[in-house]
Image: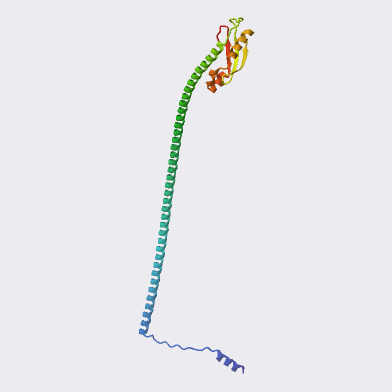
């Protein structure tokens, strides 16, 4: 019983046997296959060559593009440098022009100030000469006026002395060494308003005779036409000196 079963199992697992039959290949088919393989190989080689060529062309294009970009970058850098150089030159020219303008303006201002100074100096000199001329004229006029006034003063004084002397009567007690000085106060009408003995001769009769000679005149009418300034300066208060020699000073 067991032996039958083992035999059945062994039959069940026994491998199948494939029998191969060697058949000779057709030469024409083999040639065609070889030719086809060669064509395919050539096709693959052409494709590889094409790919290599395209790759080289792509690399060349990339290289050319990089070269073009580098040239463009260099050109842009050169243009930028040229532009910056032109801008620096323009800036320098503008600065030089501005400096020249400022220098010309300073020189023009200096010339203007110098002209103003010279003109002011000329005006001052002209004014000084005018003032000197005016002062000289004024001095000349004043000198003439003073001379005229002095002459008029002497003339009016001579009139007063003459009128007083007409009324002067020397007393018997008069001596040669006697001198009496009187102050006469007048008003513009020529009226005598006061007579004062400022220095006595030492003889009452002599002093009284001198005072009476002035009071006897009373009014010097010749003074009425006198310029007011001359009257105020020389005749509102007047000193008269009396001596026994019958002379008034």
Viewer-closest of 58 and 137: 137
Split into 4 quadrants, where in the image is the C terminus?
top right
- Count of labels in the image: 0
**Image coords of residue 246 (percent x, y):** 56, 8
Split into 4 quadrants, where in the image is the N terminus?
bottom right
* Left or right: 58 as drawn, with respect to 233: left
Would residue 5 be seen by someone viewing this image from the given angle? Answer: yes
Q: Residue at x 44, y 35 (%)?
A: 115
Q: Residue at x 42, y 49 (%)?
A: 90
Q: Quadrant of residue 248?
A: top right
**Image coords of residue 60 (percent x, y):** 39, 65
Q: Please identify the residue farthest to the bottom as the structure is shown.
A: 1
Q: Quadrant of residue 112?
A: top left
**Image coords of residue 210 (percent x, y):** 60, 11
Q: Is residue 228 above or below residue 21?
A: above
Q: Is residue 244 above or below residue 231?
A: above
């Amino acid at each position: 019983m067991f032996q039958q079963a083992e035999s059945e199992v062994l039959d069940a697992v026994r491998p199948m046997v494939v029998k191969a039959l060697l058949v000779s290949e057709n030469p024409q088919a083999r040639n065609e296959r070889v030719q086809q393989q060669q064509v395919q190989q050539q096709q693959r080689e052409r494709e590889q060559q094409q790919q290599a060529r395209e790759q080289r062309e792509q690399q060349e294009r990339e290289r050319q593009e990089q070269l073009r970009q580098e040239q463009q970058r260099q050109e842009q850098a050169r243009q930028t440098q040229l532009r910056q150089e032109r801008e620096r030159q323009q800036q320098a020219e503008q600065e030089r022009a501005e400096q020249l303008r400022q220098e010309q303006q300073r020189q023009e201002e200096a010339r203007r100030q110098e002209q103003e100074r010279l003109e002011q100096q000329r005006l001052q000199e002209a004014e000084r000469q005018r003032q000197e001329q005016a002062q000289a004229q004024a001095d000349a006029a004043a000198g003439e006026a003073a001379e005229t006034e002095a002459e008029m003063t002497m003339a009016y004084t001579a009139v007063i002395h003459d009128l007083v002397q007409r009324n002067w009567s020397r007393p018997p007690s008069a001596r040669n060494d006697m001198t009496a000085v009187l102050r006469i106060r007048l008003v513009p009408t020529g009226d005598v308003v006061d007579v004062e003995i400022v220095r006595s001769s030492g003889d009452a009769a002599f002093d009284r005779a001198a005072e009476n000679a002035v009071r006897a005149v009373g009014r010097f009418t010749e003074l009425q036409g006198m310029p007011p300034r001359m009257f105020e300066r020389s005749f509102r208060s007047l000193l008269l000196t009396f001596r026994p020699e019958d002379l008034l000073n």
